[in-house]
Amino acid sequence: MNYLDVLSTKPDMLSPGISTCGGCAMEIALRRVLQIAGPNTVFSIPPGCAAGAGTMGWNFTNGVRIPVHISLLPNMGSMMTGVSQMYQRRGREEVNIIAFAGDGASADCGFQALSGAAERGERMLYICYDNEGYMNTGFQRSSTTTMGSLTSTTPAGSVTHGKAQAQKQLAFIMAMHRVEYVATLSPAYMKDFVDKVEKGLAASKRGFAFLHVYTPCPTGWHFAQDMAIQVARAGVKANITPLFEVEGGVWRQTVKNSRPIPVAEYAKLMKKYEGIDEETLARWQKSVDADADTLARLTK
Amino acid sequence: MKALAITGNISAALGCSLARPDLIAAYPITPQSSVVEHLALLIAEGKLDSRIVHVESEHSAMSVLSGASLAGGRTFTATSSQGLALMYEPYFRVSTLRLPVIMPIACREMTSPSSIWCGQQDAMSVREAGWIQVYVENNQEILDMVIQGYKLAEDPDILLPMNICYDGFYLSHLVERVELPEQSQVDSFLPPFKQYDAKLDPDDPMAVDPLTEGSILMQYRMSHLAAMKRALTRVEEIDREYAQVFGRSYGGLVEGYRMEDAEIALVTIGSMTGTAREAIDQARSNGVRAGLVKVRFMRPFPAEALRNILAGVKAWAVVDRSVSFGWNCGPLFVETEAAICGSDLARNSSYFSAIGGLGGTDITLDLLLGLLKKVTGNKRQNGKMETVWLDENFLGRVE
Ligand SMILES: Cc1ncc(C[n+]2csc(CCOP(=O)(O)OP(=O)(O)O)c2C)c(N)n1
Ligand code: SF4
Ligand SMILES: [Mg+2]
């Protein structure tokens, strides 16, 4: 099915009125993933914006049409291992087992459980939505926060200004677990997005599938509510969030980016990099170039 | 019926295997490791049809079990000390989600100082996490309580996870005679796993654990406590049902030994009870009217059973293999004292806390005989006496 047909015909699994901030890219990703997966799904979200926005619900009401459980922050990979193992034991392999976890829950606090589940080849689709920080607890830094970012734990001061380190490349690391499928996604490239979710779902019936979705956050990054797609596209153009997939050990860049824009141009779109100095910009550009180079060699 | 000479860890594994679990997940730690090694062997040899997940930590072990239980499976893990501490987050959640997971704890000291040896500090420290906890005396009781544990935990009126706590090395690594029930007997005693409220199933979709306001949360806690209360009765009933099928009874919540006309008593928990039986026998042969109370369940706490069995005793001591850091006492003593508060027993007897066996030190027959002498000497006193530390000369004192 054409991706536009998928998005226009498949029923929405998420309540129309969940309480993410206006213009939140995570909400787009969540809605699309569930729409593509459909009702025969067991779903889990850890603490974070995706759960807090009413998806998990309040008292006796909730925001999705499918079974959903809020995992603990550090245990998504292992909790869903238990679910997946039982579905296989009962011969119900057709049920989608989907985890939707933030960067903090995936790259930091829950990294061990994620790595364990991937290494064991547990059958599930694990999606990390990356808003580059702990947004639900007030925009603190995470290991995927980009260099120079102002967060509530890397504020602007007279001694230090923003995050000093470059972001952890989670998708690279997951690919080295030799799992069934790894891909990076952006809500600005919807055809690519839908293809990868469908591939990931299929791969999750054979083993572990990992999707890394870049989800710009207007509230935490400080840009206008109608700009999330523009910011997401600029991230791809600046090589900060390159779109690729790894399947059967073969790396492929799915959206080519022959004339990248400088990271400085991307940084101008939001206040997250306000006051960033030239030296940090240069270091950041260097690290982005180095990663792009690595990716170019891997995808050759 | 087959009799085997096996360690406590193998006994726990065989009890688990007889209960036909759907899924096992565990992480190695001394002195627990051979429980899961043995289960892995049974699976490898085709003698047990269960899934086993070789997780990367205890936090994940308990998390895998929570997911499998929510997806409708009977589950098992085992751990000790640091492993238990690491899994505290999902451990607490499994009980508050009312998932009937079974987990033996091969009891071990908590670090620091660094120690791998016996002590009940690990299991005692988590007694407020909502699990049922039984503490056993020997290897036969380990196997029997794993099987009984599933029956109790999965009872629709209970639905609580349960720990079978047994002393590390003293039981985990000690070889004893254990009678192995027939699979058919266990199958008729233990019904297949059935799922009730919380579940993850697209055929019956629900949100498990939405954000919940305090007034509803309070109802959850009350319902949890009510289940604990019902467990007080179910423990006794299941003990009797088990005796009918397998011919072994442990007395339910507490077991009295030579308590009929006892004037003085020791209250014990865990493997020290075996030595204490011998000490009581020797005291009896010297004309002392001594008896023994073996406390089996810490959760739910058998307050009424303890009051009843100790009624009429003149002097008694509670022996703990761990400490309560808020008191100069052991935790079993603190709770026993709470249980007798306001009773005739509290007014008309003398009692104290004895602490020993920490970090794998032996609670020897001599120590218990000396302790009995101390208790006998208190016969004409009333009220709480100073805590005694079980070292060679009973000289240990917290100043
Ligand atoms: C063990 C543990 N530590 C801390 C928290 C508090 N906490 C809740 S959500 C959150 C941030 C999660 O960040 P991320 O996964 O990136 O999701 P986001 O909020 O950005 O959507 C934290 C730290 C927790 N729930 N559990
Ligand atoms: S803080 Fe950011 S990620 Fe969270 S709901 Fe708001 S926009 Fe979305
Ligand atoms: Mg985040």
Image: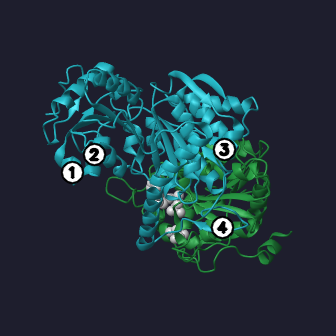
Chain colours: A green, B cyan
Q: Total of numbered circles in the picture?
A: 4
Q: Amino acid at mark 1?
A: Asp
Closer to the observer: label 4 or label 3? 3
- What residue type is disc 4 on? Ala
Q: Which residue is mark 2?
A: B311
Q: Nearer the viewer, mark 1 or mark 4?
A: 1
Q: Chain of mark 2?
A: B
Q: Toward the viewer: A50 or B75?
A: B75
Q: CA distance from mark 1 to mark 3?
A: 49 Å
- The residue at which mark 3 appears reads as B23
Please name whichever residue, A230 or B342, is drawn nearer the observer in this view of the structure: B342
- Which mark sits nearer the N-terminus, 3 or 2? 3
Q: Which residue occupies 74% across, 39% down?
A: B49
Q: Earlier in the sequence, mark 1 or mark 3?
A: 3
**Is the shortest distance between ligand 1 and the CB of mark 1 under 8 Å?**
no
Q: Earlier in the sequence, mark 2 or mark 1?
A: 2
Q: Chain of mark 1?
A: B
| Kind of residue indicated by mark 3 | Leu
Residues at badges 1 and 4 in contact (C-beta under 8 Å)? no
**Real-space CA distance between mark 4 and mark 3, rounded to the nearest whole angstrom:** 33 Å
Tag 3–tag 2 contact (CB < 8 Å): no
| Chain of the residue that carries numbered disc 3 in the rendered image | B
Residue B143, x across and y down, in percent:
57, 35
Spatial CA span between label 3 and label 2: 45 Å
Vertical placement of B98 versus B137: above or below? below
- Pointer 2 and pointer 4 on the same chain: no
Which of the 4 quarters of the picture holds residue B13?
A: top right
